[in-house]
Image: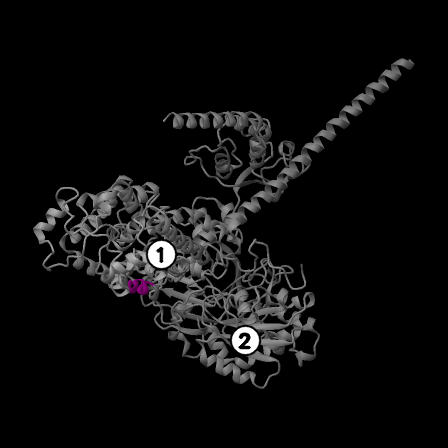
Amino acid sequence: MTGFNDKSGPFTHAPTSVSKTMVTVLLALLPATAFDLWLFGWPALFMFLITVGSCVLLEAGCLIMSNKPLKPSIVDGSVVLTGWLLAMSLPPWAPWWIGLLGAVFAVVLAKHLFGGLGQNVFNPAMVGRVALLVSFPLQMTAWVKPAPLFAEKSPGFLDALGITFGHAGGNFDAIGAASALGYVKTELSRGVPVTESMAHFGSSFSLGDMLIGMHPGSFGETSALLILAGGLLLLARKIISWHIPVSVMGTLFVLGSVFHLADPARFTDGLFHLTSGATFLGAFFIATDYVTSPVSKKGQLVYGFGVGLLTWIIRSFAGYPEGMAFAVLLMNALTPIIDHHIRPRVFGRTYKGEPLPLKGEK
Amino acid sequence: MLIAVGSLAVMGATLGTLLGVASRYLHVEDDPLELELLGLLPGANCAQCGFVGCGQAAAALAKGEAGVTLCPPGGKAVAEKLAKKLGVKADLDDQEDVGPQYAVVEEDLCIGCTRCIRECTADAIFGAPKQMHTILKDNCHGCAKCFKVCPTEAIKMCKVPVTLSEWHWAKPEDVADVHAH
Amino acid sequence: MKLFSVRGGVHPEYRKERTSESAIVAMPLPATLYLPLQQHIGAPAEPVVEAGELVKKGQLLARAGGAVSAPVHAPTSGRIASIADMTAPHPSGLPQPTIILEPDGKDEWAELPPGLFDPFKADPQAIRSRVAEAGIVGMGGATFPSAVKLNLGTEKKLEILLLNGAECEPYLTCDDRVMRERAEEMLDGARIMAYALGAPKVVVAIEENKPQALEVVKQAASTLPNLEVVSVPAQYPMGSERHLVQAITGEETPARKLTADLGIVVHNVATACAVHHAVRYGKPLLARVVTVSGGAIAKPQNVEVPLGTLVSDLVEFCGGLAVPPKRVVNGGPMMGQPLPSLAVPVVKGTSGILALTADEANEQPSEPCIRCGTCVTICPCGLVPVEMSAFIRKENLDAAARLGVRDCVSCGSCSYICPAHIPLVHYFNYAKGRLNALDREARKTDHIRQLVEGHNVRLEKQAAAKAAAAAAAAQANAEKGGEA
């Protein structure tokens, strides 16, 4: 038999594959995305398609330029996922060039310049978003009130084209609005205590509404409930383990609650932290990105704790209202160190690597 | 503005001075490279590389005066190791990987002249004048000096066979190794 | 008995139902038997017969070649055709010396050494001798000479003889059938071994996916003292002896040490049966049960095969190949070795012959690693396959060794589960082999260096002696001249 010893085995394999994993993640994101596309109307749909489409095209371009095969990266869903997550963190009515530039930052800069699939240090979607945020703060914080498809206030198809491809900046003032975190932070800087601003926004920011998500924000910030459902699907299918989501959300919740108890006027409470911003999206979909998070379970707990801590710090003290993206990028930088120092204990050895002592031996 | 320029200039000057001081007083002497290279060579001083001994060959390698493919008995393995240690890229593709060899005396042709015994650097050949010569396989490292001096061509170089216990798996060829394309 | 959890592991499909429900079938003698001199770990056996000799069944054909070795016996009576090199049932495809025996069809027994009447009153050394003379080796596939393992009782204090009935590999059911059909022989052999080792207790561990075997063995064990039958979770690799010991006792065997250092010796269930026959009746190891399975086999079943039968004959007996197989594997699909062809013999360690179709083997081209970390989660040895394989790919074997690649038992769980189909365990097999080869080369280089130094020292001494002699002669001449 020729070539019989080209492989050493095993000669059986679990029915797992990269594309199956990617498709399951996309499936988990689908309900929330569909809801949000409906919630924000045609412009959101265009933004979404442009972002994802740009990512795929740029990926193909980079692969061709570096003489790498187009399969599997194009068809296994990994770059579609990057584009999808990026789109979910952009303002729904963002102009076309925001999506395109975001794709450039994400796919070309954060992914291919580092070596391609599996080699990037930083989460590509988050690099895209953060680069855009820092470069184009106006467009990236132009949140709109929900204008569901086919509802009265929603722009029609042609109007939407105008919004997406029209004059940069658009005419948002009429229906522009702040996201929950943005509003709270702005009010705080004006001296309005947190409790008041949270109450003032009343119906928009009650727990129920936060979860259901009919309020301004990016895709990831609205529809918290649907995202949570998607996250639970990922857990059930064993795509992710509980370690990162629980440590991210747990840290945020604990810090939020403790400090809210200490100073209710200054700090928002734990539950608000969990349901506002892109917490669920970040905890289940972004921080759990395979390539940029630690491989060991203990390492993942440390990583998740770091993400939660940094998010809370940025949200409470720093200039930006939403801290998850920065927190994730900062912890991505620490992932190699975490992986280097936190390793599982080898069977039969101590943590230092020495053979375990026998009973009666020192 | 002036403060900014001034402070950066002062920082730059300070750090530059520190670097200069460090390069003088923390300088690492004595390149141990030559000793390490010597350790990689077979150490049999067979002189097939053209140098009198492995020590001279190592010195030449360290100075960059010799190529990493200089050692025939070491073969591809040694060449690769030398290339790695020196940090050079060596075109080893056309180097015939003969693999380790050992010498065998063909008893029909041996005339007992002892020339090979005198040549052998590892004292691996046993025999006496006008007596049959034998080479101890385990002590032979394939430098081929005996092969070259034998007047009747009674010595042949054979490839050291891979035994069942020594065989091991080859490196998997990544069929879809995207980095190899 | 309290069980402890074992970290990691995978749960492949059993695929055992094709062969587990039918009884073991005895295969008739083939036309020729090919008996390699090395069917065990250790030094090859040394032949004591020559071509042309007539031998009887059970006669010694090759004696043990050293302290760690095992003899080879004639599985039937016949004529020695020759002793020649033949392709080994080994992934290298290399040849090895093999005794070729042509059966005469009479199946006449040679005179066997008498069995021990009451093994439990005999000297343990006598039991060890019987096991050594019978050529018994670990029949789970490791093929370590069992008599050498039985010696451990003289060196260490032992508590338990653990019988490994886990059989965690997919497809394989030979141990399952042996336990169901030959439980009494197996338990008797186990108790004899425990006695020889000085271990007061016997524990039989059987995976929970074999409920019938559990019942039969429990029944057979109910009348015997100091014998416990335990059901362990069906988790691959539960059959790995270190992990089985951990499941039973909760203790991890320290690296580079034996399970015997924890007071436990592990043996396969088929080995125990062989010990029973050797000690009670003086019969040497002449045949073994092999699971023939896989999608490409027409009639999968468990067969009792005379050692030395060609795999092609065995496959013929099982209805031949229904379709051309993608791989023919010796052993289970996880840790089994690919065979170079069907023209190789069944040996003492052949627990299974699997002819796998392309669907079953599910080999896909490998994709870039996405660092999902699943390999880290399931590694039963606590290693980090993702990092080790990356280092090995870049030929940085030292870094891989520091990460513990030498502690890898090659169970294959990581390769099995990797979504990118990266051949992880193949990298580790390569690394381990290459590191060993480099060690050998280093030792050889040191050896040669010593010889060369000795050579130089000798030459210097000669030169010095010459110089001294010349100086002495000149001195003598000068004195003579002075005198005259």
For label 2, the SS is loop
Query: Is residue C111 shown to the viewer in this render?
Result: no
Q: Of discs 1 and 2, which sits in the foreground?
A: 1
Few, some or many residues within 10 Å of mark 2 (<14, 14–19, 20+) = few
Magenta stretch, residue numbers: A228-234
Q: Mark 1 lies on which chain?
A: A
The residue to which callout 1 is attached is A265
The residue to which callout 2 is attached is C2
Considering only vertical position in the picture, is C111 above or below A67?
below
Name the image quarter holding residue B153. Answer: top right
Name the image quarter holding residue A131. Answer: top left
The answer to whether the residues at label 1 and label 2 have Cβ atoms under 8 Å apart is no
For label 1, the SS is loop
Task: Please name whichever residue, A330 or B169, is drawn nearer the observer in this view of the structure.
Answer: A330
C53 with respect to C466 (left or right): left
Please, which residue is most extreme toward the front here? A191
Q: What residue type is labelled 2?
A: Lys
Q: Does the magenta stretch include residue A230?
A: yes
Measured as percent of width and height from the top left, residue B138 is found at: 61, 44
Structural distance between the alpha carbons of marks 1 and 2? 55 Å
